[in-house]
Amino acid sequence: MIQYLKNNEIDIKKYDTCIELSTNSRIYAFSWYLNIVADNWDVLVLNDYEAVMPLPWRRKYFIKYIYPPAWTQQLGIFSSTHISEKLVLDFIKAIPKKFKKITIQFNSENKFKHKNVTERVNYVLPLNKSYGEIYKGFNNNRKRDLKKAIKSKFEIVKNINKNDFFNFYLKAEKNYKLNSNQLLKLKSLLDFNDKNIQVWGIYHDKNLIAGLLWLKDDNRITNLLPVASKSSKDLGLPTSFLNEIIYQFSGSNLIIDFEGSIIKGIADFYKSFGIEKENYFLYQKSFNVL
């Protein structure tokens, strides 16, 4: 039986254990992460936490709706056993009718067909080979950037000051814009003291010129937020961050999750590391009340 539980009714220990043991676990789904990035969140639970589906939600004009929080790419259903198409559809049907609009980005293991679904593309790189083998998959642009980065003699500084990173991000040129709520959630994520949240940087004359916020759990390294000045891009420094992660964790059972991109230039950059495609599904349903 699938049961809807409000946040204060959730057995957090059982919930997090389900996420941790899931074959399709994502760091975004842990309670501590959702507490930071979601305005509110409840959950659908199968039996005694055999499978769970977090439901981040907001209220607008007294109307509640389910939305994908900033800094999460894939949520959906999590379980240590196989998730069938029927189970996915059963979970969708169990979403309470009080939510008048639904937008959920299901994870790549939640495979199903539905008229309200759009397929999206993510990029991942398995690290279960030696660094040398993975490096062979880099295209010529990445190898050339690495040579430039080595010649520049800039060093990656690990665990940099998180306020430095946040302020650098605010000032950096971007081809997108975040609203105040998204920036607030980012600041809260940076302020959260957890070893799974890593912030690296490269400095020049004591000024940050490139940075990377990435996440790590037992299964994935998530390339959450790269930031770089134009001069650092010209020197190939963004490539250095990802290369360092690949070098450090090569030969492990981890994968790098690049989080895809609909921006062609960024997508091409990720593809140049010899990645694999990972499809996931965006589910949207509206009752035309917002």
Image: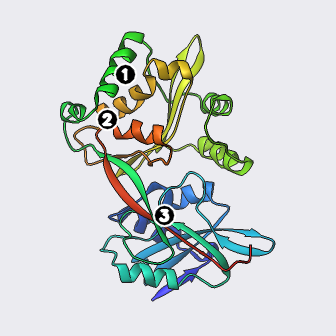
Asked which secondary structure carries label 3, the reply is loop
Distance in Å between CA atoms under marks 3 and 1 = 34 Å
Tell me the tag on residue 44.
Answer: none
Residue shown at the point (42%, 78%) measured from the top left: 88
Q: Residue furthest right?
A: 61
**Is 231 or 29 nearer to us in this picture?**
231
Distance in Å between CA atoms under marks 2 and 3 = 25 Å
- Badge 1, how many Cα within 10 Å: few under 14, some, many 20+? some
Q: Looking at the picture, how far across and down is residue 175, in whole percent? A: 61, 38
User: Which amino acid lies under the numbered mark 1 shown in the image of this protein?
Assistant: Asp
The residue carrying mark 3 is 75
Cβ–Cβ below 8 Å for labels 1 and 2? Answer: no
Mark toward the start of the polypeptide (1 vs 2):
1
Vertical comparison of 262 with 284: above or below? above
The residue carrying mark 1 is 145
Asked which secondary structure carries label 1, the reply is helix
Cβ–Cβ below 8 Å for labels 3 and 1? Answer: no
Q: Looking at the picture, how far across and down is residue 70, in whole percent? A: 60, 53
